[in-house]
Amino acid sequence: MASLCFAQKAVLAPMVRVGSLPMRLLALDYGADIVYCEELIDIKMAQCERVVNDVLETVDFVAPDERVMFRTCSKEEGRVVFQMGTADPERALAVAKLVESDVAAVDVNMGCPKEYSTKGGMGSALLSDPEKIEAILSTLVNGISKPVTCKIRILSTLEDTVNLVKRIEKTGVAAIAVHGRMKEERPRHPVHCDYIQAVAESVSIPVIANGGSSDMVKTFEDIERFREATGASSVMLARAAMWNPSIFRQQGALSVEEVMEEYIRYAVRYDNNPFNTKYCLCQMLRDRVESPFGKRLHAAQTSEEICEVFGMTDFYNKTRAELEARKAALQTNGDQPQLPRLEEGVLTMPVRFERRDYPPQITPKMYLLEWSRKEKLDQPVYETEQRTQDRAFQSTVILDNKKYRSTLWEKSKKFAEQAAAIVCLRSLGLPEGRIGEEHSGLVNKRKRDDKKCAALDANESAARKRHISEVPQEEEEEMICRTKVVNGVCGQTTR
Ligand SMILES: Cc1cc2nc3c(=O)[nH]c(=O)nc-3n(C[C@H](O)[C@H](O)[C@H](O)COP(=O)(O)O)c2cc1C
């Protein structure tokens, strides 16, 4: 796919809480060319796992506490820019690599004046550290294949602003968004079009003018007026789009009521967090948030209740039913017994461990350990390899002198071990603790095939209730694991 071009574009600005998937899709539907996600902090993103969500047809970046930090889908492919908050070139690169294949470009926030950003050296704190800016941007530009951009605020003099932007251009960024306010200025202060204009004249990369909502940009036509007033190549809108994303519509804005309904459709379809949905709807209601309608919305706690307030219960029920049916179909397909292949003495299957498929505190490794104990076998031994090129992991579990391995490489050692345990359990026709497993008929079918399994099955629901209390997490962690680095400095560890 061709690299994203930032010239002559109408852009949805990055906005914390507002810029989640439903708002981005809506802005694109109405005519935005490019959409930025909300700023995501590098430290939090670095801990995320990339998960393909087959039910929602999305790619999710999921934090260890199961929160979805960033969700994207094919509808915004090639048009979504990932914005991060960072003060560290290497961490920024690790995060950029994590999301690189799922986004059109990566942006660094250098304008946020809020304390939570600046005290960590991020956001507008970077503006007074040009060496750090250069280090972050050039590391990103050299380290990923997608375009890199940044978003700044103006400095206190025109000369300083132009000098900084020239240094930024030299790092190889594809574009620069300029919020025409200084870091001490608030939204009520007028935007400095002359600063943006001076920047646009001094660099050859596209400059994206920002800061025009409210005083300058109120309608679709104003977008072009703001562009002309700043001499910029493109325009980025935050608040004007937050209040009514149909401002991007060439034929004229739609009523907020209509827009809110469309927003809810995306929020339900993509299982958006209801509190996030409510927040965005409240921004669109603006001063009507205190009205009886606004209060009813405020009281809603779930997506279903939000839909009720908007008279969209039928839509909610239909969409949820479709998603549930899809999930059931996927689980049934996934439950078709898979036959392992024997590869160089190892039984293999292409399986991945998806945390969300298992109840909290239940893992395939626990199931395997418990089964091995019941069968009076030596406990499973995990040998893990790490490849140098992408630092991904692959585990082999050895049980009863047989080896089992997933052919897929995982981002973490823990997940690789779980995947190996799944291969072993499936090869032996044993239950693995997955949600809905007991309803799929799979367990019963296998039970008939494997008498040994019967005892475990009988205990299964009881074990689940007490979270397999006889196999506490710490003990599972103590299971014998060996890690070695493939093609790297070889080290074998036993813990
Ligand atoms: C609710 C809200 C959240 C914002 N979050 C971000 C953010 O995550 N990253 C960022 O660079 N700027 C953020 N901003 C600043 C906007 O992107 C933009 O620079 C500013 O609002 C000026 O543009 P406007 O006049 O079009 O609103 C946020 C602004 C708002 C109103």
Image: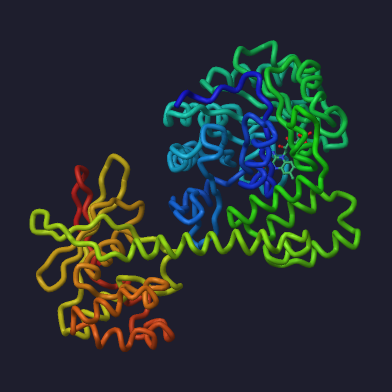
Q: Residue at x 54, y 60 (%)?
A: 322
Q: Quadrant of residue 377?
A: bottom left
Residue 92 appears at what percent x and percent y?
A: 50, 39
Rendering coords of residue 72 (x, y %): 53, 45
Front one among 86 and 450: 450
* Rendered residue at 29%/51% (across/down): 409
Q: Which residue is depicted at the point 68% across and 55% down?
A: 276
Q: Is residue 402 above or below residue 25?
A: below
Q: How is the image coloured?
A: rainbow
Residue 411, position as x, y percentages in the image: 36, 51
Residue at the image point whose x is 47% and y is 23% from the top: 2
Q: Position of residue 183 (x, y in %)?
A: 76, 34
Position of the N terminus, as image quadrant, is top left
Toward which corner of the image does residue 33 lie, by quadrant?
Answer: top right
Residue toward you, 368 or 449:
449
424 sits left or right of 443 in the view? left
